[in-house]
Amino acid sequence: METTFYSLATKGNFNKALNHFFKVNDVVDDIESRRNLADVINNQLDAAEVVNDQILPIVGAVIKDKYNYSYSSFNIPVTVTEFTKISEESLKWTAMDLLLVYYTPAGSIVLINPKNPSHWERVRELTQDHLLVIYAKFLKEEENKKVEIEAIRAIEEMLAGKDVFVNKEFIDSTVMPKVEPKKSAPAAAASAAVAAGKKRLTPKYSVQVTNELFHNGNVEAWKKIVESFKTAFPDLDVLIFYENEAINDINALFKWGKVKSGGVILFQVAGENIRGVSKLQKYLFEGASPRFEQFLKLGVGKVLNLF
């Protein structure tokens, strides 16, 4: 028996699917207006207008199927932490639309417009041997798959630290390079940062729960991790969000059974000299997994030395 539509039998699932279809239509309008998908989705993630589970279905339906971008899967050959060259170079490629889909060590997915420096701030590093899928589209009226593949190869070579040959067809001399401006942080995050007296705020980073549910053990692991972070960096604050709500007390949110496997929790770091974010995301992911017990082995009253 065909079961494709069984999940739509409930009102909640039907409305969720309907909202997703509306979102896809909105994204199509944005792409038609020559906006980059990563710019669109990252702004909407920051505003809690989409959730992480929607990212890959949107990429598949819009970028891959509807607009037929060329693409290639790429295992990152070396860890990359410097992105200025690739950002400045790709910004000149006004005849190309580029999208990178990065699969992080924490198990989440990040969309990157390589022309947009703020997107590189989201990942901070591309980790060796992790998956990156590169999409490219030639924006002139005629289709040119050869140029798209060349652009993908050029991105791969730059990420490998190599000098690249830039095809003149990557550049449309009639179009000025532009980067979409960063939108302000959501009100809850901004107010939390102001309350903390901080001047800088990272983007929201996602942590997916992979334990069967986020139970008391996971709660205690997260408290230990955040305590370790705060001890190492007392000038920084960790802001936590779930379902577009700022969470001031971890215990108040993560009650038994509330956040189940597959749920996504967001966090930001606020402060002047921000550091340690990649490690924090990694440890929080571990703390939300079945491996949370590794953070609970230290004696009561002692602080983990993680950072």
Image: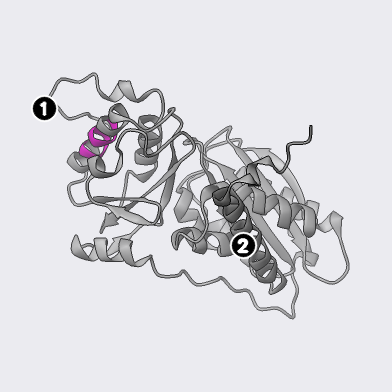
- Judge whether 286 appears above or below 37 on screen: above
How many labels sit on residues?
A: 2
- Quick check: is 226 in the magenta stretch? yes
Q: Amino acid at mark 1?
A: Gly
Q: Is residue 131 left or right of residue 280?
A: right
Q: State whether the magenta stretch is mostly helix, strand or loop.
A: helix
**Residue that numbered label 2 is attached to:** 23
Instruction: Give, as a single range, the part of the protein colored magenta.
Output: 221-227
Choose between 93 and 261: the one closer to the eye: 261
Q: Is residue 33 left or right of residue 118?
A: right
* Residue positioned most to the left: 301
Q: Quadrant of residue 300?
A: top left
Q: Amino acid at mark 2?
A: Lys
Who's the residue at 23% across and 66% down the image? 194
Spot occupied by residue 184 in the image (x, y as percentages of width and height): 40, 70
Disc on the earlier residue, 1 or 2: 2
**Residue that numbered label 1 is attached to:** 301
Q: Secondary structure at mark 1?
A: loop
- Quick check: is 247 in the magenta stretch? no
For residue 208, the mark is: none
